């Protein structure tokens, strides 16, 4: 995307979660996860590329030993609506018998995270928990609900805090919604 177009999208968007609220949500989620997993040494998997900002801010706040790896699976690519699941990278770390915590940017329709969770269970994970920074309030049933949620966002196309709009603005410390999206 050309820089001028990226700036125009940002200038024409609505801030739906400001940077202070995002930081507070990460702190709250880290406390919830530490309370639940603090006596274990889970395998933490970040879903690339959107989950990287959430993971980067969350991991230093987790006060227990953990193992770390990542997965890269997506339904979006450069589109604004989801399609078929594409696996780019599966975890290298063994998951059999492990408690696994999956970190992702957003629970939208839930199909990507549900597929990742099912794959991990099929590989023998003892337990799979999911933490998302955003839960999109779609009003539709989802195949999975996250165990830990940072913030809720409206049913609009959102970007920032790891989520992109046509490749741009993952690096924003806040979450924005495109105007003119449902």
Image: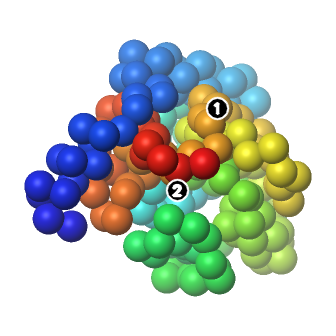
Question: What SS does tag 2 mark?
Answer: strand
Query: Is residue 104 depicted above or below 15 in this figure?
Result: below
Is residue 65 in sight in this rendering? Answer: yes
Q: Nearer the viewer, residue 105 or 91?
A: 105
Q: Quadrant of the N terminus?
A: bottom left
**In this rendering, would 87 be left or right of 158?**
right
Q: Residue at x 83, y 76 (%)?
A: 122
Kindly indicate the quadrant of the structure image that contains residue 100: bottom right
Residue 75 x, y percent position in the rendering? 58, 73
Q: Which residue is mark 2?
A: 46
Query: Is residue 23 depicted above or below 44 in this figure?
Result: above
Residues marked 1 and 2 touching at CB (< 8 Å): no
Query: Is residue 176 depicted above or below 158 in this figure?
Result: above
Residue 131 x, y percent position in the rendering? 65, 43
Question: What SS does tag 1 mark?
Answer: strand
CA distance for labels 1 and 2: 20 Å
Query: Is residue 137 depicted above or below 68 in this figure?
Result: above
Q: Residue at x 21, y 48 (%)?
A: 8
């Amino acid at each position: 995307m050309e820089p001028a177009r990226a700036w125009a999208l940002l200038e024409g968007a609505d801030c739906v979660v400001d940077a202070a609220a995002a930081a507070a949500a990460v702190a709250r989620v880290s406390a919830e996860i530490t309370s639940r997993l603090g006596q274990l040494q889970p395998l933490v998997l970040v879903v690339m590329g959107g989950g990287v900002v959430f993971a980067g801010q969350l991991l230093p706040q987790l006060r227990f030993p953990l193992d770390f790896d990542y997965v890269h699976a997506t339904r979006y690519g450069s589109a604004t609506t989801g399609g078929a699941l594409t696996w780019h990278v599966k975890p290298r770390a063994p998951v059999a018998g492990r408690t696994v915590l999956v970190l992702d940017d957003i629970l939208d329709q839930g199909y990507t995270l549900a597929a990742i969770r099912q794959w991990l269970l099929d590989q023998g994970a003892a337990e799979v928990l999911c933490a998302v920074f955003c839960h999109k309030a779609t009003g539709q049933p989802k195949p999975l609900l996250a165990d830990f949620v940072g913030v809720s966002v409206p049913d609009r196309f959102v970007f920032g805090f790891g989520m992109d709009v046509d490749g741009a603005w993952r690096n924003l410390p806040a979450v924005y919604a495109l105007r003119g999206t449902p």
